[in-house]
Image (tube, helix red, strand yellow):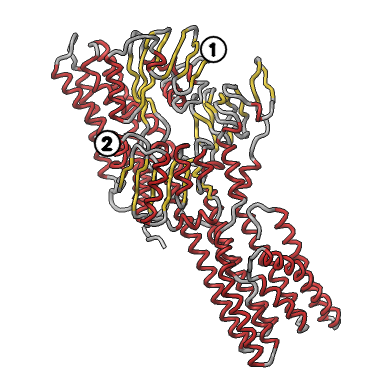
Amino acid sequence: MTTPGQGPGLRWQRVSLALAFGGVAGGAILRAAGFHSAAAWVWSITTLAALLPLTAAVIARLRRGGLGVDVIAVLAMAGALSLEEHLAGAIIALMLASGQTLESHAASRAGRELAALVSRAPRSVHRYEEGRLSSPPLDDVRLGDLLLVKPGEVVPVDGHVASSAAVLDESALTGEAVPVRRERGAPARSGALNAGGPFDLRATAAAADSTYAGIVRLVREAQSSKAPFTRLADRYALLFIPATLLLAGAAWLLSGEPGRALAVLVVATPCPLILAVPVALVSGISRAARRGILIKGGAALEALAGARVLLLDKTGTITSGSMVVSDVVPLGAIPPAETLRLAASLDQVSPHVLASAIVQAACRQGLALSLPSGVEERTGQGIRGVVEGREVALGRWDWVRAGAAMPQEIRRVRRRTALEGSSSVFVAVDGRPAGALVLHDPIRPDASITLRGLRRAGVSRVVLLTGDHAHVAEAIGAGIGADAVLAERTPAEKVDAVRSERAGGPTVMVGDGINDAAALAAADVGVAMGARGATASSEAADVVLTVDRLDRLGEAIEVARRSRRLAAQSASAGMALSAAAMAFAAAGLVAPVAGAFLQEAIDVAVILNSLRALRGRRRKGSPHEAAARGTFHSEHGRLRPAIDRLRAVADRLDSLAAEEARRELRAVDEFLKKDLVPHEMTDEAVLYPLVAGRIGGEDPTAAMSRAHLEIAHLARLFGRLVADLPEGPMGQDDLRDLRRVLYGLHAVLKLHFAQEDEHYLTLLEEPAPPAGRPME
């Protein structure tokens, strides 16, 4: 049996098919011309050409302790030669060649998406060296190198966009057909295609450590996998072979006609189970690959179809895994924007997980970044260097404080981040504390709707399994509706938790970190969120989601269920038809030649049915809808940090000086008037009509439209409060009213954006299973 992408095997089987067809046709022409002996010789040679290699393969398999239904094919062709049923033997040879060619074609087609990834891997890069471009090999790229990516080229390594912007086609990695725009400072993953103009890339990883190298390794592993259903077919052959031989012997014994025994063997060859099942499973793997889901063989596909218990890591799985700067707390005379600019300039050359978020936050504000020099980075502590002649340090408080005592403001920041489950990064400039950056990891917008869909599809238990603090994990667990929350677990304890959950049924563990690798390997199916690079979790997992979206897990389960259903359907139908044909043959109603043609038709039918696993049942959205979805999703990402700052400003109003408080409040008012309210008006005019068309009915978006009115009302109220502020210190009544409106706006907007992300934006995409049918 061929594995995906075996071009030479497919070519050889096509040659065998051509020879077998030529032998059958040539013999028929000779017989029609009256050369009966010559026709018999041609058919006999055709039969022998298939019989000899097949016999050698069966003998080799028997020596390894294996047994398959190819034994029946050997007996049928040998019987045809001995009984001088020359045409029947040649048709069996043609039948085998055509069945193997169809199977190999399916496997080759199924592996096309995987093989395409390997063939796209770049071999060299364009690197800036002393003001000139050189073309060193890909393996020579080092962290911090500045590269040029030309139009139509594949991004060679992971990095940050170092020019104004880049337009990337990530379909080979994620399955997303619409190109995405990456602003300056945004991450660009290796393997994406430059769909716009040339752009500069600052490397944050070597080639071997980049996303694309990890995916290529996963592809090769997937290509070498073998489906377990094939082994199941071989075990089933232990029953099928004796039954076939018993029926053939009985037909011969009772009728005294050896031709009946031969006819039984012919219609039993080859077993559709061997052909239909691998084709369905490999086709399912192919369909999943097109959607950014790498399934490592049929074993994982079949196990995924029966999932009952879902265990989820928190960071990078339930949360986005991409930190966002939500606040800049000043600690000295340097303004917050300048503190962020200096920190982002230094972090341009850092591969740290928080560096990208800091660089993107600065770029969103339009801050001009400079290239640092004299950079020193210490794992687990921080980074320091020189930016525009100023010494900048970024990282833990112990790393940046330069001997300074911890001020009360820093204590408040650390307490706030501990309660919220967020992170803080401290900044010092010229040896003095300058500010603190507060970052948080938001829950994925698609998390709740994905988990609800999985429950409808048959997952009976959802467990949040994390090494994070209990209070943070419990808040996240409540937000997604988890049945249990297991927090502060070490990697070994995660493995124990996975094993204990097996009592509830087949387990699926989803994670993305190195500390998840052992738990992924221990689960019945390990699923890695591998979109951000090659990690130990991706190597240990059975399924890798190369697109950074949790809803692909629902698609993976739907693909697995449908592929398994089609495999079982094809095998059952093929076996039933073969059994019926065997009964007719034993009764003398089907001659050997006719039986050969009949079995060929059965095999072709079940293989074609299995190939349906390549096709989805998804209704594609229009290009206009896809573009609208991308635009509004990007807008939500741009606005969220400013929305998070509403609460931060409200929290700090009491501690700010009057003039500084006014600056903060005016900035919020400007954001509401120039950014937020226009965005909501565009939602109402563009997004909601598209959604209404998908939902149907009379005014289906009325409830969400009412939220727009409330947001606009609160924004106007806040503007009046700011305009009416007195000169000098603000009174307690002013502060109370401002905080009340800010907290109200923050709460309404967080809920409103979450609802739009979960329901409305999802509707504009291709509707994603899992659906409301119970699992089989």
Residue 101, position as x, y percentages in the image: 68, 63
User: Residues at badges 2 and 1 in contact (C-beta under 8 Å)?
Assistant: no
Q: Which residue is drawn at 44% across and 14% down?
A: 393
Left or right side of 78 for 714: left
The quarter of the image holding the N terminus is bottom right
Residue 295, position as x, y percentages in the image: 53, 50
Q: Badge 2, how many Cα within 10 Å: few under 14, some, many 20+? A: some
Q: Which residue is drawn at 81% across and 73% down?
A: 45
Numbered disc in front, either 2 or 1: 1
Residue 403, position as x, y percentages in the image: 37, 9
Asked where in the image residue 23 lies, by quadrant, the reply is bottom right
Judging by the rendered image, the residue that carries numbered circle 2 is: 708
Q: Is mark 1 on a helix, strand or loop?
A: strand
> Residue 374 — which label?
1
Q: What element carries label 2?
A: helix
Between the C-alphas of marks 2 and 1, the distance is: 50 Å
Left or right side of 451 for 209: right
Say above or below: 23 vs 309: below
Q: Nearer the viewer, residue 560 or 336?
A: 560
Q: Badge 1, how many Cα within 10 Å: few under 14, some, many 20+? A: few
Asked where in the image residue 99 lies, by quadrant, the reply is bottom right
Q: Which amino acid does label 2 sit on?
A: His
